Amino acid sequence: MYVVFLGAPGAGKGTQASILAQKLGLVHIATGDVLRDAVRRETELGKQAKGFMDRGELVPDSLVVNVVMDRLEQDDAAKGAVLDGFPRNAVQARALDEALAARSSAVDLTVYLDVPEEALMVRLGGRWECSSCRSPYHEVANPPKRSGVCDQCGGVLTQRADDQPETIKRRLQVYFEQTAPLLEYYRDSRVLAKVNGEQPIPKVTEQVLSVVRRAEKG
Ligand code: AP5
């Protein structure tokens, strides 16, 4: 099963995609995580992507699309994947459709996490993540058991460089201009399910699982 998570920055894509991938035994492909890792390791991709990410802009398709296509070709993605942060515009959506069609597959479900803009600012401002396993936390909604320490692996929690107020505003603008139109794209192909993302995390997960079960039944 190929599941795409759509939603604004801070809507909870990373949180829910990670839970769903674990529950379904599928790989979780998060382009933001892949790019941040490349920036940290100072690879060629990271060097080229960094400026765009720091400004809250999309990294060019010519850099991102191949990364995802290569990942999808690996054996562990043969039976499906949970995609988080990809596609982010029409070019990427078409590239994904073509890659899946080449293996007689398709996007089975697109989960749109709907969260009002005011709530997004609060979420991103209070977000922390594990510097080691990348598990996401929030100082109010999803705090770690021990302050500053990851529950999953004991790693140190840090804040993301692009979670500054001005960059958050730009990321939201870019989302509404370039990514939100994909809702129509997936609505037209009848795989779109909207989930209210402004509920406690377990409640959102419950509803995500319910739309997944419906999609599995066809
Ligand atoms: P990316 O890492 O994908 O960032 P984003 O889309 O801005 O999304 P976020 O990770 O900020 O939010 P999220 O929806 O995953 O929410 P989360 O679960 O963390 O991309 C970063 C950058 O990389 C982009 O700006 C771009 O430059 C580049 N990039 C990435 N992909 C690209 C692509 N395909 N093409 C081009 N460029 C690309 O939750 C947020 C916070 O809220 C957390 O603290 C969490 O604990 C909390 N939270 C989650 N759910 C709830 C809830 N239900 N209630 C309360 N709090 C909650």
Image (cartoon, grey):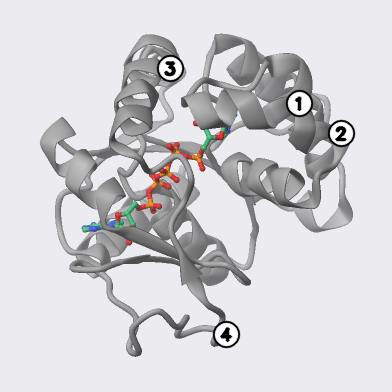
- Is 32 left or right of 203, judged from the image as shown? right
Q: Secondary structure at mark 2?
A: helix
Mark toward the viewer: 3 or 4: 4
Q: Position of residue 136 (x, y in %)?
A: 43, 64
Residue 95, located in which quarter of the rendered image? Answer: top right
| Residue 6 location, quadrant | top left
To which residue does mark 2 refer?
44
Residue 153 numbered mark, or none? 4
Q: Amino acid at mark 4?
A: Cys
Q: The residue under label 2 is which amino acid type?
A: Glu
- Which three-letter amino acid code belongs to the residue tagged 3? Leu
Mark 1 = which residue? 48
Q: Earlier in the sequence, mark 1 or mark 4?
A: 1
Instruction: Work out whether mark 2 precedes mark 4 in sequence or the reverse, and give the earlier one.
Output: 2
Q: Residues within 10 Å of mark 2 (few under 14, many from 20)?
A: few
Q: Mark 3 near mark 4, Cβ–Cβ under 8 Å?
A: no
Residue 20 in picture, x, y percent from top left: 47, 61
Residue drawn at point x = 38 percent, y = 43 percent:
163
Contact, mark 2 vs mark 1 (Cβ under 8 Å): yes
Residue 101 seen by the camera: no
> Which of pointers 2 and 3 lies earlier in the amino acid sequence?
2
Q: Which residue is mark 3?
A: 182
Q: Quadrant of ligand 1?
A: top left
Mark 3 neighbour class, 10 Å CA radius: few under 14, some 14 to 19, many 20 or more = some
- Residue in the image at 32% along x and 44% along y: 10
